[in-house]
Amino acid sequence: MGGEVLLGADLGTSGLKVVALDLTGSVVAEAEQAYAYDRPAPGWAEIDVRTWGTALDRALEALAAQLGGARVRALGFSGQMHGVVLVGDDGAPLRPALLWPDQRAAPELDRWRRLGAAERAALANPLAPGMTGPMLAWLGVHEPEVLRRATALLLPKDAVRGALLPGAPPVTDRSDASATLLWDVVSDDWSAAAVGAAGIDPALLPAVRPSAEVAGTALLPFGEVPVVVGGADTPLAMLAA
């Protein structure tokens, strides 16, 4: 196969898919890797972050075999929303990722209920225990040493992209940030009140960048490829539809 293609990787709850599109938007190749998340206790949902990286590597290798000599112009990401990946100084995860089906943080939602009406309204989301802010609050109560060691918070797709770009600063996009219960959609910035409710150091929060911005260049089976920030799966699916 010749010509030029764009790659899109979708990090789902039960699997990762990569598709190659030609410059007209038609799918020319695809590959998928399945995985399962862990349930270490009733209502909990976690996964070893390395599982995602392994799935991406295998999917890209399978795609490379299909694409032959096609030139890959860029790789973009979509991903499941609301998760928590905490990394340390070396960029490595400090614990398994917490995922959106997780219910352990239900008691922590009272912190958000105590926010002022305007502060809550600016979050523009229902209160759900599987969102990033409440899960961080739970970690602060039950695993405070992990939060003390953490240097950055990443959303799931951002953790996978970050592993491709070692040394790149932690970033997310507005679609993922807006579903954390930490983002003020009115002021277009992290909510000081909600971050205070979560009980975390604001320095943990990633910079928020446009979804189409190039975050760095990664060496992939196709050669060096620009990697863009990407977005959350539900908004991107709506955009595609």
Image (cartoon, rainbow, N blue to C red):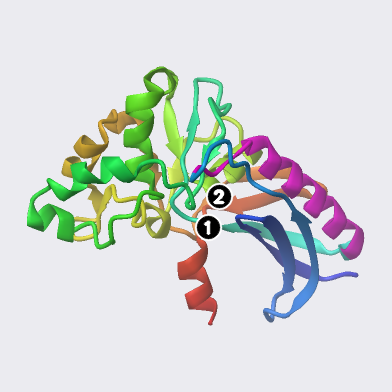
Q: Earlier in the sequence, mark 2 or mark 1?
A: 2
Q: What element does badge 1 sit on?
A: loop
User: What is the number of callouts on the image?
Assistant: 2
Q: Is residue 222 visible?
A: no
- Evaluate if marks 2 and 1 touch, with contact meaning CB atoms under 8 Å apart: yes
Three-letter code, disc 1: Gly
What is the magenta segment's predominant secondary structure?
Answer: helix
**Image height of 140 relative to 83, above or below:** above
Q: Is residue 138 left or right of residue 102?
A: left
Which residue appears at 33% of the width and 45% of the height? 106
- Give the x, y percent position of residue 55: 74, 47
What is the crowding at mark 2: few (fewer than 14 residues within 10 Å), some, or many (at least 20)?
Answer: many
Q: Is residue 221 left or right of residue 35?
A: right
**Image height of 141 relative to 18, above or below:** above
Residue 56 among those drawn in magenta: yes
- Give the x, y percent position of residue 209: 40, 51
- Say the numbered circle drawn on residue 193: none
Kindly identify which residue carries mark 2: 157
Q: What is the quadrant of residue 136 in the picture?
A: top left
- Give the x, y percent position of residue 103: 42, 47
- Give the x, y percent position of residue 202: 28, 33
Name of the residue lying farthest toward the front: 42
Q: Is residue 154 visible?
A: yes
What is the crowding at mark 1: few (fewer than 14 residues within 10 Å), some, or many (at least 20)?
Answer: many
Q: Which residues are magenta?
A: 44-66
Determine the CA span between mark 2 and mark 1.
8 Å
Kindly identify which residue carries mark 1: 230
